[in-house]
Amino acid sequence: KLDARLDLWKLRLPNEWDPLLWWSELLQWRHLMYNLVINAFKLFETINPHLHQLGYRDKAWSVNKLASVARRQGLPDTCIHVLTKMYGFSQIEVQEAFSKVREQAKAYLDIEGDALAGLNLVNSTNLEYF
């Protein structure tokens, strides 16, 4: 049931054109809730890894979504900042890891003169992982 409720949460988002502040407030609050889920199911890591992964998966999705909205609203520096500062965890699904790298690369392309940084990011990424 928890998995279904967390998936339903993903569908309840502001409009793409709403201010980034609204997106940030909502997704930051969810970020805190996912941390609670992660801590609550920490004991289940060996017994039922799926429960333990619930918070990590959705936390990564939220960070990627916030970064994507920032980039689409013309704030590529904010996009990179969000992806750099809010990703304070190492357990991440392949799909979310790919989304993170993709958003970072797109943001670097949007910043004049930073295309080389985006290329370096892609070159330094272990593409075998994907």
Image (cartoon, grey):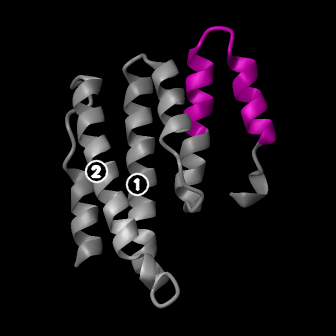
Q: Is residue 108 left or right of residue 7?
A: right
Which residue is rendered at x = 19% and y = 49% of the image? 12
Classify mark 1: residues with Cα within 10 Å, few (<14), some (14-19) or many (20+): many
Label ID, residue 59: 1
Of 7 and 90, the residue lying toward us: 90
Classify mark 2: residues with Cα within 10 Å, few (<14), some (14-19) or many (20+): some
Give the x, y percent position of residue 99. Answer: 54, 46
Of 59 and 94, the residue lying toward us: 59
Residue that mark 2 sits on: 30
| SS for dot 1 | helix
Q: Is residue 75 above or below residue 58?
A: above
| Residue 15 position by quadrant | top left
Which range of residues does the magenta coloring cover? 102-124
Q: What's the distance in space between the residues labelled 2 and 1, CA to CA?
A: 8 Å
Give the x, y percent position of residue 30. Answer: 28, 50
Which residue is rendered at x = 21% and y = 26% of the image? 18
| Farthest-out residue, top | 112
| Residue 120 position by quadrant | top right
Q: Is residue 48 above or below residue 74?
A: below
- Nearest to N terminus: mark 2 or mark 1: 2
Which residue is rendered at x = 54% and y = 54% of the image? 89
Give the x, y percent position of residue 126. Answer: 77, 51
Q: Is residue 7 above or below residue 99?
A: below
